[in-house]
Image: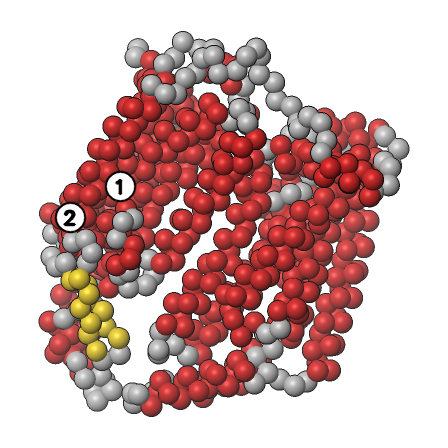
Amino acid sequence: MPSWLAVAKNEYRLMLSGKVTRRLRKPLPILLVSAVITMAAVLITASHSLSLELRLKESLESMLALPLKLDPFILLLITDTSFVWRMGSLAGVFAFLIPIFAAIGRQLEEAEVVSKDVVLSSPLKPVHVLIGEFMVNLLMLPVILLLSTLFFIPLALIFYLSLQTIVLIFATLILASLTGIWIAVIVSTYLFTREYRSKAKSALKALLGVLGVAMGIGILVLSMSTTPSSFWFLPPVWVANTIHFAVTQSNVAVVKINFAYFFIPLQPDGWTSFTLLAVLFTLSFLLGAACSSKIKFTSVFEGREETSIIKGENLFYKAFRKALPYPLNIMVVSQLKEFTRRTDNIARFVSVIMLPLVILLMSRMMRSDVTSGGDSLLVLSSLSSFYFVLVGVMLPMMVIPYVFIDSKDLLWTIKKTPKGIRLMIYSMVIETLFLSVPLSAVLALLFHLSIGSIGGNPALLLAVMFFMVLVSTAITTGVYASRPVFKEKGFGHFVNFVITLIVTGIIVSAMLILLVTPWVLNLIVAAPLLQAASWLPQPTSIVISQTLTYLITNVSPSNITLQMAGAAVSIILGTISIRVSIRRGIRKLESYEG
């Protein structure tokens, strides 16, 4: 058996090592390929039978809506194709970026639990590992095609998709996916061999994870807008341009705004984009061949490699030991060292900063739409509030669970020490607050920049964020102490997260609405007026909607008593929840027998 095939089989076996997935090892590839072929047939059949019928129906509805809509006949000849480009962008993001994140993430996960002595001392050559990893990651290809075709269902209902169109779309997605998989294998293999060489490379590895998440979310959100020519160099844009050409047989995107049609040429055009994908595919494999000689699995480390926490102590840890009483300082410093030792913990923790950036991009796109009114405002405020609470809950969730993961034996040792569980609970709270409070201040500032004037006073926003982090830290600590989860992939993490999110949201909701976004009360009152304004002729509808939106967000309710009462209720409930959560957590963990 070739060495690369042995590596691929072993990786495939490890990937499907669960009790349920173990039975799917043989039929899974056949099932996935069959599902892709079936989906392609469904798209072609639906397009041939429904596309013309739905176009005629939409045109007739526009005729009945006269004189509010003046283009029923034009609708048959000119169709808004900008959403074809958007769907193509989403498919491009899935095809190119998801393989990179999945392959690198799986490699980093295995690097933490598998001794690298076995790999580094094995007779395998780097090219065997690269090809084997690439072959096993091909399993993601049909999965990506299935997910991407979901975005093409609306296209099949409007445009006539021929067999040649489906073939070109699938060829484009396959090129992007293969390129992403190969790049991911090269980068993950390089990181695997360099993981413990220096702190600088560990920091770069964490930065790579954060930048990867930022790039993925940024492109995903930007793809919701019309064709941005400034991003012509991105592979997902090439995928979108090729798919637009395959579906519409045109290199010009048609954008309809109100009653006007705008024609935007694609940059680059469809065939040029497909050629660029093919060139990138070829260059990535040439890069892999060149890098295979640079990656070495032998003589990387002198002697036997051992995993150890940070040796010595700098001023940071010494200051902690002096600031906290004994023996609490020992527990806090130990937990901080254990958390910062793993670079994936740091990358995961810092990646929370992406959520307010999503809100920033969404708000910019909504404000650029001249027809946006109460609906967009309500959506923006709802999503902002949800993400605001989500950030406050996720920060502690990025720290506290990892105190318990693979630490069951350590828990028994702590239980035998005097007041060991009490010290452990308090140290978890202190460690989490120390890591979360500075980042929460940055997140609050980003949220204020994202939602602008509708976010109210930035000082109040910062105070609410600090209060929410404090409450969610105590609740998360209590929940995990009551329901400890010792496995990294345990379903209990999701249950604990949902419990913390619901309880924290209930406690903080009154303070968040009354202090940060009090204008939401105006929106409830003005909703009928905004609905009525949308039925007026243009441009009167736009002017009235924008005026009402300005009044809603800038004329806040002046009931100070109601605001203070809501804040007081949240503070009282938060104080009670902090006290109850910590006490319950100590009691439950002390009585835990596993």
**Mark drawn on residue 272:** 2
Task: Establish if 574 lies above or below 171.
Answer: below
Q: Is residue 30 left or right of residue 98?
A: left
| Amino acid type of the residue that numbered disc 1 sits on in the rendered structure | Ala
Task: Establish if 417 lies above or below 56.
Answer: above
Task: Establish if 81 lies above or below 419.
Answer: below
Q: Residue furthest right?
A: 418
**Label 1: how many residues lie within 10 Å, few (<14), some (14-19) or many (20+)?**
many
Quadrant of the frame with the C terminus: top right
User: CA–CA distance between discs 1 and 2?
Assistant: 14 Å
| Amino acid type of the residue that numbered disc 2 sits on in the rendered structure | Thr
Which of the two residues, 102 or 489, is positioned nearer the viewer here?
102
Residue at 37% from the left image edge and 54% from the top image edge: 220
Residue at 52% from the left image edge and 71% from the top image edge: 452
User: Looking at the image, is mark 1 or mark 2 nearer the viewer?
Assistant: 2
Residue at 24% from the left image edge and 87% from the top image edge: 68
Q: Does any portion of residue 366 appear in the rendered image? A: yes
**Mark drawn on residue 91:** none
Indicate which disc, 1 or 2, sits on the residue closer to the N terminus: 1
Q: Is residue 295 left or right of residue 439?
A: left
The spot of residue 305 in percent (x, y) is 57, 16
